[in-house]
Image (cartoon, rainbow, N blue to C red):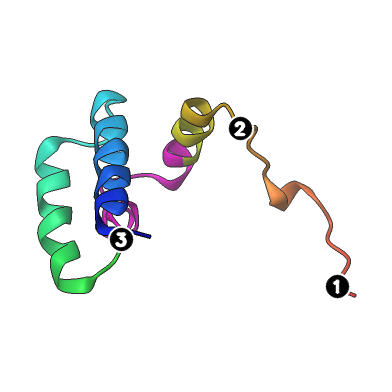
């Protein structure tokens, strides 16, 4: 993936999180600083620092992309 496309994706996610009220700008700024040290994605960094709740992120992404979300814990998976 090109750097421009990756930056574009980061900006869309950042805007979605801010507009949806899921995180504050200060949380984003802190995560961006940390991300430059760790190389983790923005969302992973926000989750790790406790600024973002995973369920809220999933709900927001499902709504934004219009994809149905599936909770796999509700299914029994055959180990074979």
Q: Earlier in the sequence, mark 1 or mark 2?
A: 2
Q: CA distance from mark 3 to mark 1?
A: 30 Å
Q: Position of residue 44 (x, y in %)?
A: 34, 58
Q: Is residue 53 left or right of residue 23?
A: right
Q: Can you see residue 50? A: no
Q: Earlier in the sequence, mark 3 or mark 1?
A: 3
Q: Is residue 51 above or below residue 24?
A: below
What residue is drawn where x is 23% and y is 30%? Answer: 18
What residue is drawn where x is 14% and y is 66%? Answer: 36
Q: Is residue 43 left or right of residue 68?
A: left
Disc on res. 79: 1
Number of residue marks: 3
Q: Can you see residue 11? A: yes
Q: Which residues are magenta?
A: 41-57
Q: Quadrant of residue 16?
A: top left
Q: CA distance from mark 1 to mark 2?
A: 27 Å
Main SS of the magenta part reads helix
Disc on res. 67: 2
Q: For numbered disc 3, what is the local secondary structure?
A: helix
| Nearer to the camera, 66 or 31 | 66
Q: Earlier in the sequence, mark 2 or mark 3?
A: 3
Camera-near label (2 vs 3) is 2
Residue underneath mark 3: 48
The reply to whether the magenta stretch includes residue 45 is: yes
Q: Is residue 78 above or below residue 54?
A: below
Camera-near label (1 vs 2) is 2
Q: For numbered disc 2, what is the local secondary structure?
A: loop
Look at the image and tell me in which quarter the C terminus lies. bottom right
Q: Is residue 21 left or right of residue 75?
A: left
What residue is drawn where x is 27% and y is 26%? Answer: 21
């Amino acid at each position: 993936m090109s750097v421009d496309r990756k930056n574009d994706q980061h900006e869309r996610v950042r805007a979605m999180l801010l507009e949806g009220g899921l995180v504050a700008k200060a949380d984003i700024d802190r995560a961006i600083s940390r991300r430059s040290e760790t190389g983790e994605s923005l969302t992973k960094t926000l989750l790790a620092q406790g600024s973002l709740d995973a369920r809220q992120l999933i709900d927001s992404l499902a709504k934004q992309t219009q994809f149905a979300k599936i909770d796999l814990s509700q299914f029994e998976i055959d180990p074979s």
